[in-house]
Amino acid sequence: MASTNCEKLLTATDRINEFGHLEIGGCDVVRLVEQYGTPLIVYDETLIRDNCRRYTKSLAKDGHRVAYAGKAFLCVALCQILAEEGMFLDVVSGGELYTALTAKFPVERIYFHGNNKSADEIAMGIKAGVAHFVVDNLYEYSLLKTLAREAPRPLSILLRVALGVDAATHRYIRTGQHDSKFGFAITGKDLDFVVAGALSDQALLLEGFHSHIGSQITNLGVFRQAVEIIFEIARHYRDKHGWQPTEINLGGGLGVKYLPDDEASSIEDLTGLILETAAKQMAAGGLSPRLTIEPGRSIIAPAGTTLYTVGSIKNIPEVRTYVAVDGGMTDNPRTALYQAKYACMLANRATEPNEGVYSIAGKSCESGDMLIWDHPLPAVKSEDILAVFVTGAYNYSMASNYNRLPRPAVVLVKDGTASIMIERETYADLVRLDRKR
């Protein structure tokens, strides 16, 4: 294999075949492109299932739960896989909930999140029979309290709290600091008010607390800190109200390797630390709630690879060479939003040695539409197939139609067989909701 170093990002079902082509889940990506076109997001079903099983095997015991964070990526087929793997599901909008209901995901395994759920979304969740609502603020508490009176049974709720933990990640994906837009501050009076009100409301069943400190976290020490603080909160309200919280939800946030030499903790590292820290807190404080975590990226990101076709190539002598592909910020806005970094290879010429350094540009009319800066590759040619790794999370879910570009197709591969998860949008789809004067 060429010395791209990308082999470190290949999964157990990836390989370079005898034609020098990348294979994912037993499928030659050149054949996938011939059949489905590009841009194309390819998901490895085996890896998705393996990651779910690693989480459930290492944490989901003694009543503890693992809920997939749907905001990372969600579609009907994925919901079906998650249901088959016994996972719970975290949704944050009516659209994500509708997707889960369309897939017939078990409603008793759904947590409904979001910092600004509308009355219609809450009513939709109640009507569907969603088992758990995560309350984010006073406004939402007021809505839920009113709507719960019409529910056939008390609504189980968790209160999201901002723990004040600095997750040391990009500022746009920190969610647990004191000035976060998410959750009740633990230093104000709002949390006292809502806990007391919920405990006295016959239409609500307060189960416990929820927290989420951020995303793409590589320092596991902050999870230990989060567990300790949220148990301290639980003990405080237990002592104040004589109430036993039955659930502590610690959110997600485990980081993944985007570049070959990135460092990342394993799923088992995270679940082991959480169980160990929580066990000490339970023993010391006389609490025995179930634990729930909500991983998304760490399950789905490594399982996704995006394929592009190379178009124009622009060489600026002694500066750089731009390679333009047929996608970009419309199917992967993370580089523009977070300065995210990725690794890639020429999937149709994967064994050839690197001959230059290239910057991968998208086709949108924005100077900021860059996917990768200064990456070593073989001599790139137009019509080559470029594979960008670890693009399974926050890519399609954040995709747009900027410049009226259709969103890509998404396929699922396993044991040499590919199936469509999401059809490619057509030009007709782009104008379907438009109305003429």
Image (cartoon, rainbow, N blue to C red):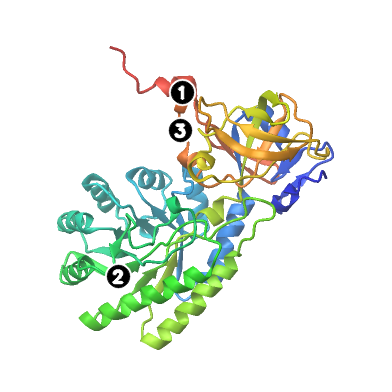
The image shows residue 138 at horizontal and vertical percentages of 20, 58
- Neighbours of disc 2 within 10 Å: few (<14), some (14-19), many (20+): many
Secondary structure under tag 1 reads helix
Pointer 2 residue: 207
Tell whether label 3 touches label 2 (CB within 8 Å): no
Question: Would residue 242 be visible to someone looking at this image?
Answer: no
Report the Cα–Cα distance between label 1 and label 3.
9 Å
Secondary structure under tag 3 reads loop
The image shows residue 391 at horizontal and vertical percentages of 58, 44
Q: Is residue 233 left or right of residue 252?
A: left
**In the image shown, does 155 or 200 lie closer to the viewer?**
200
> Mark 2 belongs to which amino acid?
Glu
Determine which of the numbered discs, if any, sits on residue 404 in the image. 1
Q: Nearer the viewer, mark 2 or mark 3?
A: 3
> Residue 356 lies in what quarter of the image?
top right
Tell whether label 3 touches label 1 (CB within 8 Å): no
Pointer 3 residue: 400
Question: Would residue 245 be visible to someone looking at this image?
Answer: yes
The image shows residue 84, relative to residue 396, as above or below, that is below
Q: Is residue 70 left or right of residue 321?
A: left
Q: Residue at x 69, y 55 (%)?
A: 261
Residue that sits furthest to the front in the current view: 318
User: Quadrant of the image for the N terminus?
Assistant: top right
The image shows residue 288, relative to residue 270, as above or below, that is below
The image shows residue 2 at horizontal and vertical percentages of 82, 43
